[in-house]
Amino acid sequence: MGTIISPSVLSADFSNLERDVKLLNESNADWIHIDIMDGQFVPNISFGLPVMKAIHTHAQKPLDVHLMIATPDDYLEDFKNAGAEILTVHYEACPHLHRTLQRIKTLGMKTGVALNPHTPIDLLKNIIQDIDLVLIMSVNPGFGGQKFIPETLNKVRELKTLINNSGSSTLIEIDGGVNLETGKKLVDAGADALVAGSFVFGSDNPKETITQLSTL
Ligand code: DX5
Ligand code: ZN
């Protein structure tokens, strides 16, 4: 099995969303990454539930939803109803993370926890068993097209050790500044899944780019 690839529609053409989602359906992408930003948790607003529902109408791959919002607890059920299969909340936005994850599970979704670049891996030590996916941010969340932060590679190795020691089957996903060069280093360090936005949609042949990433 190759690397799981989750292209981010944040870099798609919003006036041709149906076309771009169909492109992802026909590609070797495994998931479709949905970036929800509220202008509070991050200094940018992307799109919300109605647009996500429209994407879900056309998507033939699981929606991998990344909530960059200040109060995710208020919207868990709404995102289930909008088609989320994996629901990732930020560690920094969840004072009662254990409860949040139990609710995501009860709603029938996979649990994801995202960490900002400065947030240490250690903080997940006592909750790793409840997490299906850890999303390590390799840029500061809020915008596509930013430069990869190299310290991420150490975090991936640390998380891999934590997961192996715990015996859990948590997946490691990385988000931000992923291209063929950084992607290769991440996979070598232990990443299972890569998010890529601008590198995929900014390329001449997005489908081919997805295939190249998936074989890293
Ligand atoms: C950033 C988002 C990312 C973004 C990645 O806050 O979480 O998912 O779309 O974009 P690239 O791949 O262009 O860095
Ligand atoms: Zn994201």
Image: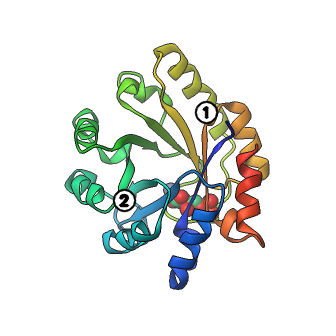
* Up/down of 211 relative to 91, above or below: below
Q: Do residues under tags 1 and 2 come within 8 Å of each other at their CB atoms?
A: no
Residue 70 falls in which quadrant of the image? bottom left
Q: Residue at x 78, y 73 (%)?
A: 204
* Up/down of 186 relative to 164, above or below: below
Q: Residue at x 46, y 61 (%)?
A: 34
Residue 39 appears at what percent x and percent y?
37, 69
- Answer left or right for 191 relative to 121: right
Question: What colouring does the structure picture have?
Answer: rainbow
Neighbour class for label 1 at 10 Å: few (<14), some, many (≥20)?
many
Q: Amino acid at mark 1?
A: Val
N-term-proximal mark, 1 vs 2: 2
Using the image as rendered, state which of residue 16 and residue 103 is in the foreground.
Answer: 16
Using the image as rendered, state which of residue 30 and residue 12 is in the foreground.
Answer: 30
Q: Which residue is mark 1?
A: 156
- In the current view of this chain or complex, which residue is farthest to the bottom? 15
Neighbour class for label 2 at 10 Å: few (<14), some, many (≥20)?
some
Q: Which mark is residue 79?
A: none
- Answer left or right for 103 relative to 160: left
Q: Is residue 141 visible?
A: no
Q: Which residue is mark 2?
A: 41
Q: Residue at x 69, y 43 (%)?
A: 150
- Answer left or right for 118 relative to 106: right
* On-image quarter of the N terminus: top right
Residue 162 appears at what percent x and percent y?
52, 21
- Answer left or right for 171 relative to 182: left
Residue 110 appears at what percent x and percent y?
37, 41
Q: Is residue 134 visible?
A: yes
